[in-house]
Image: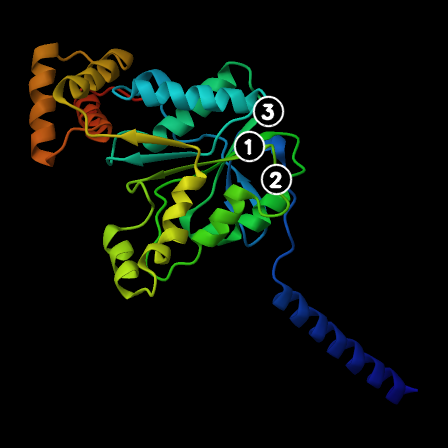
Amino acid sequence: MSDTNDTSTVLLAELTRLADAIERLAGPAPATNDWTAADCFVWSPERAYLQPVPKPNRVALTLIRGVDHVRDILHDNTERFADGYPANNVLLWGARGMGKSSLVKAVHADLLQAGHDTLKLIEVHREDIASLPKLMDVLKAAPYRIILFCDDLSFDHDDTAYKSLKAALDGGIEGRPDNVLFYATSNRRHLLPRHMMENEQSTAINPSEAVEEKVSLSDRFGLWLGFHQCNQDDYLSMIDGYAEHFALSLDRDAMHREALTWATTRGARSGRVAWQYIQDLAGRERVRLNKE
């Protein structure tokens, strides 16, 4: 009897060990997504999980200056989508620091405040683009209107993740879910460096077709919104808007002189440079900044 018991114990231990090994190979079980936990999420493909972001890093829409035309287009497109009407995927491209990603987050927040509480914003990291088909499976049954947002999107040589993005934008045979839009920001209008496209053309049997597939990626975005370096008046308007919003006390002329010197030392005028100067000024005046 004791030999039988010993054999049973050994077999049970071995089965337990094998079960544990299989579980480790299978990876973590998918987490349960709670749509009510937040209005903004970050996609975690390993667990097929939407990580809630209770306090997103964003600025008020009224603080984004110098991009009024594209701001209005993006706001209108997003509002139509939130209301259940047709809308386009959007590529925001152009100069660094001009508020592309800030504008996406600010428009989302503005529409939430206007009562569009079924509108969710999900950030997809650049390195997770290949997991978009898995994410679409999660989103298609969601009872919400969803904007997928990828910041600083671009593709390098031998990068095939763009194929997943093309499938997500076009939807393939199943079609992109009606409750999902894709917004992306990039410094490149075609999402590829020029030298990469030229290299593809020079080594191809048919140069015109060599880059057609990759260049056509940006064509999947119905709206292209261009952001350009701001002029001095727009830059100072940003400074004035921030200063008024945060009740900074420095004399306006003195503040302008400081802000222009600040921009000169950085070799550029942009919304980001304006914000960096305001942070410095607020620190000197011991003022706390609440961006919303």
What label does residue 118 carry, if any? 3
- Residue 121 vertical placement versus 26 (above, below): above
Name the residue type under label 3: Thr
Question: If the image is split into quadrants, where does the C terminus sit?
Answer: top left
Q: Nearer the viewer, residue 291 or 171?
A: 171
Q: Is residue 136 left or right of residue 248?
A: right
- For image coordinates 31% across by 59% down, the residue present is 207
- The mark nearer the N terminus, 3 or 1, is 3
- For image coordinates 10% across by 35% down, the residue present is 267
Which residue matches tag 2?
139
Name the residue type under label 2: Leu
Q: CA distance from mark 3 to mark 1?
A: 8 Å
Query: Coloring scheme of the render?
Result: rainbow
- For image coordinates 35% across by 58% down, the residue present is 210
Residue 278 found in image quarter: top left
x and y percent of residue 1 in the render? 93, 87
Mark 1, other Cα within 10 Å: few <14 / some 14–19 / many ≥20: many
- For image coordinates 65% across by 44% down, the residue present is 32
Q: Is residue 235 left or right of residue 67?
A: left
